[in-house]
Image (tube, rainbow, N blue to C red):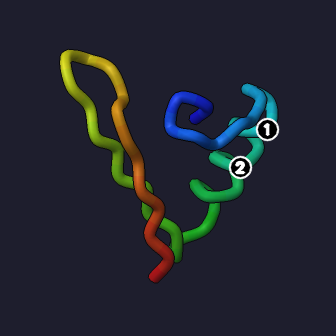
């Protein structure tokens, strides 16, 4: 996430993703290139 301009720690990101995965309203889309994540977007429906 830091490479995308969002400073965070691994622990903080794990906690955020656990919260997101537990909620049916949240959806996360990842963009990858050559096996590396190059972007992501979160949708709240």
Say if mark 2 contacts mark 1, CB within 8 Å.
yes
Label drawn at residue 16: 2
Q: Is residue 36 left or right of residue 6?
A: left
Badge 2: how crowded within 10 Å, few (<14), some, or many (20+)?
A: few
All told, the count of numbered labels is 2
Placement of the N terminus among the 4 image quadrants? top right
Q: Residue sitting at 50 percent across and 38 percent down?
A: 4
Mark 2 and mark 1: Cα distance apart in space: 6 Å
- 37 is higher (above) or lower (below) than 20: above
- 25 is higher (above) or lower (below) than 22: below
- Asked whether 22 or 37 is in front, the reply is 37
In the rendering, at what x and y percent does residue 22 appear? 63, 59
Question: Would you name the residue on which mark 1 appears?
Answer: 12
Q: Residue sitting at 76 percent across and 43 percent down?
A: 15
Q: Is residue 41 left or right of residue 19?
A: left
Q: Is residue 38 left or right of residue 12?
A: left
In the rendering, at what x and y percent does residue 26 appear? 51, 68
């Amino acid at each position: 996430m830091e490479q995308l301009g969002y400073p965070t720690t691994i622990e903080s990101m794990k906690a955020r993703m656990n919260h997101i995965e537990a909620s049916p309203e949240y959806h996360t889309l990842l963009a990858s290139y050559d096996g590396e994540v190059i972007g992501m977007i979160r949708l709240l429906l």
